[in-house]
Image (tube, grey):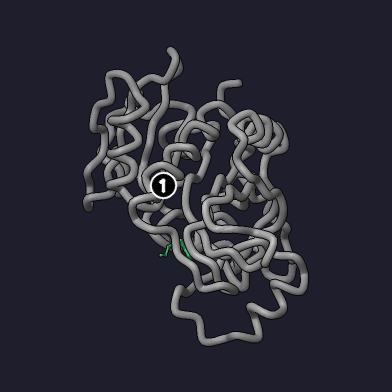
Amino acid sequence: MTIHIGAEPGQIAETVLMPGDPYRAKWAAETFLEGAELVNEVRGMLGFTGTWKGHRVTIQGSGMGMPSLSIYANELIRDYGAKTLIRIGSCGAMQEKVAIRDVILAMSATSISTPSLSFFKEVNFAPTADFDLLRKAWDAAQAKGITTHTGGIYSADVFYAERPDLDEVMERHGILAVEMEAAELYTLAARFGVRALAVLTVSDHLKTHEALPSSDREKSFGDMVEIALEAAFA
Ligand SMILES: Nc1nc2c(nc(Br)n2[C@@H]2O[C@H](CO)[C@@H](O)[C@H]2O)c(=O)[nH]1
């Protein structure tokens, strides 16, 4: 076990799906995995390991924000040997062409700061998804007939933003959506030589102010889990 994950050695699979919400980890494990067992409940950040079509998979909550995700991703990679980490989450759309329920595959993740900022000093690192995972996720989403956008997203530090000028700059440069975790996940994947991808469903829209009804959230979240699993094992 580590400081923040109570799993025993070997209880975490090499492939890890990371929703922000631990209760979504529970739902996804119960819905998609065979033989799912609870392997972490430290601080209520639930993690489960089971199999999907014979492949071992762990679904571990990351919490909200890059500092939280950074703790779990570091320990999953460094202490448990995770090799593929796929964030399955939701985001706020920043472009008119992106609609509620669409899926976004984050090719890159821009940020103002990340937990790695002090590490890089003057280097302006470009956090980027693993191309093979991205390509396979795209294929899986197309096969499901889901409207999918691939491009840059913005990983923010705050949900209640006070900088509308930032949104304008991001939108002007084609940023598709905002969330709060992917940039650090991609940075850690590059640092430790593992694969990472963020598959996001659009649950709110910063331009139209629409929001995904809670009744629809489960269906769209399920599509994301399937896209992530197919990308990981295709
Ligand atoms: N900053 C930000 N985060 C968002 C937004 N919409 C969503 Br869903 N999120 C994500 O949802 C959580 C906040 O509700 C965070 O973990 C973010 O990744 C948004 O409009 N802004």
Q: Position of residue 118 (x, y in %)?
A: 59, 68
Q: Residue at x 52, y 38 (%)?
A: 85
SS assignment at label 1? loop
Mark 1 neighbour class, 10 Å CA radius: few under 14, some 14 to 19, many 20 or more = many
Residue 152 visible at all = yes
The N terminus, quarter of image: top left
Q: Quadrant of residue 177?
A: bottom right
Task: Give the residue at the far top of this rendering.
Answer: 54
Against 47, residue 10 (above or below) is above
| Residue 201 image offset from top left, x and y in percent | 52, 50
Give the x, y percent position of residue 112: 62, 73
210 sits left or right of 141 in the view: left
Reply above or below: 161 against 123. Answer: below
Position of residue 168 relative to residue 139, above or below, is: below
Task: Find out if the beta carbon at label 1 lies less than 8 Å from the nearest ligand 1 atom.
Answer: no
- Residue at screen point 41% across, 42% down: 219
- Decide: is 219 above or below 214: above
Instruction: Quadrant for residue 199, please give it.
Output: top right
Q: Which residue is mark 1?
A: 19
Query: Which quadrant would the C terminus be assigned to in this image?
Result: top right
Q: Is 209 displayed left or right of 177 in the figure? A: left
* Quadrant in the picture for residue 18: top left
Q: Residue at x 54, y 67 (%)?
A: 205
Return the residue nearer the eye: 130 or 53: 53
**What residue is shown at x 58% (from left), y 86% (from top)?**
163
